[in-house]
């Protein structure tokens, strides 16, 4: 690595993204090193951590969120910007909760990418206005419990209260109470809207 140049790690499973980002960063006077997975990046840390990381969110194996958690467990303090194609409320919330200092979409202008890195490198956060708004709205909502998430996943699969109760070994009345709580927390009108809203926000996966 050249002396005096900020070191950036690019972690993305897409080779074309890694190459494009590396060219952009090098042209902007950064040193860039690319990794195809979160694990490959973590394995490189004993050689010397970078100044900050541009991290993909959804990768096979170890996701961006998993990588952030691994850094936190290892008490490795590196500033991270998420660069992703996904912007559901839950994606944004989980990334920031896991320790990301910035969040940017892959279709953002290249100038925004450089601005984001410089802002984060200066010790600040970088969240585009619409991302910050969605994060604020998500943080205002009460978190769903683990049991409510289980019920919500089953609602999305079209199961009835009786079927959910049998699957979870709880009474129909308990299921009904969970459903009512979910509807209230998501601020929707019925169970169908709860399921579609949860999928749209990224709270549950379509195929979960």
Image (tube, grey):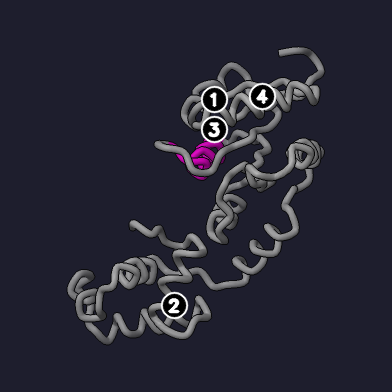
Q: Earlier in the sequence, mark 2 or mark 3?
A: 3
Seen in the picture, residue 190 relative to 150 is either above or below; the reply is below
Of the 4 image quadrants, the one containing the N terminus is top right
Q: Nearer the viewer, mark 2 or mark 1?
A: 2
Q: Residues within 10 Å of mark 1 (few under 14, many from 20)?
A: some
Q: Earlier in the sequence, mark 4 or mark 2?
A: 4
Residue at which label 4 appears: 22
Q: Do labels 2 and 1 touch, CB within 8 Å?
A: no
Quarter holding residue 45: top right
Tell me, for residue 12, which label it has, or none: 3
Residue at which label 2 appears: 193
From where the camera sits, is residue 31 visible? yes
User: SS class of the residue under badge 3?
Assistant: loop
Q: What residue is rendered at 77% in x and 36% in y? A: 114
Q: What residue is rendered at 53% in x and 43% in y? A: 57
Residue at which label 1 appears: 35
Give the percent coordinates (x, y) of residue 144.
46, 70
Q: Earlier in the sequence, mark 1 or mark 3?
A: 3
């Amino acid at each position: 690595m050249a002396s005096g140049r900020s070191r950036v790690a690019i972690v993305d499973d897409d080779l074309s993204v890694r190459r494009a980002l590396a060219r952009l960063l090098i042209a902007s006077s950064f040193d860039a090193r690319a990794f195809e997975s979160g694990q490959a990046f973590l394995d490189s840390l004993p050689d010397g951590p970078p100044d900050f990381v541009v991290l993909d969110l959804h990768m096979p194996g170890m996701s961006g969120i998993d990588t952030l958690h691994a850094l936190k467990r290892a008490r490795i303090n590196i500033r991270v910007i998420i660069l992703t194609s996904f912007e559901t409320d839950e994606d944004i919330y989980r990334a920031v909760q896991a320790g990301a200092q910035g969040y940017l979409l892959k279709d953002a202008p290249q100038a925004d990418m450089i601005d984001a890195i410089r802002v984060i490198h200066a010790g600040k956060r970088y969240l585009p206005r619409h991302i910050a708004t969605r994060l604020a709205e998500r943080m205002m909502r009460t978190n769903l419990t683990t049991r409510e998430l289980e019920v919500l996943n089953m609602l999305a699969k079209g199961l009835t209260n009786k079927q959910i109760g049998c699957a979870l070994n709880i009474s129909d009345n308990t299921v009904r109470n969970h459903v009512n709580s979910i509807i209230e927390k998501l601020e929707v009108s019925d169970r169908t809207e709860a399921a579609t809203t949860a999928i749209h926000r990224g709270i549950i996966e379509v195929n979960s």
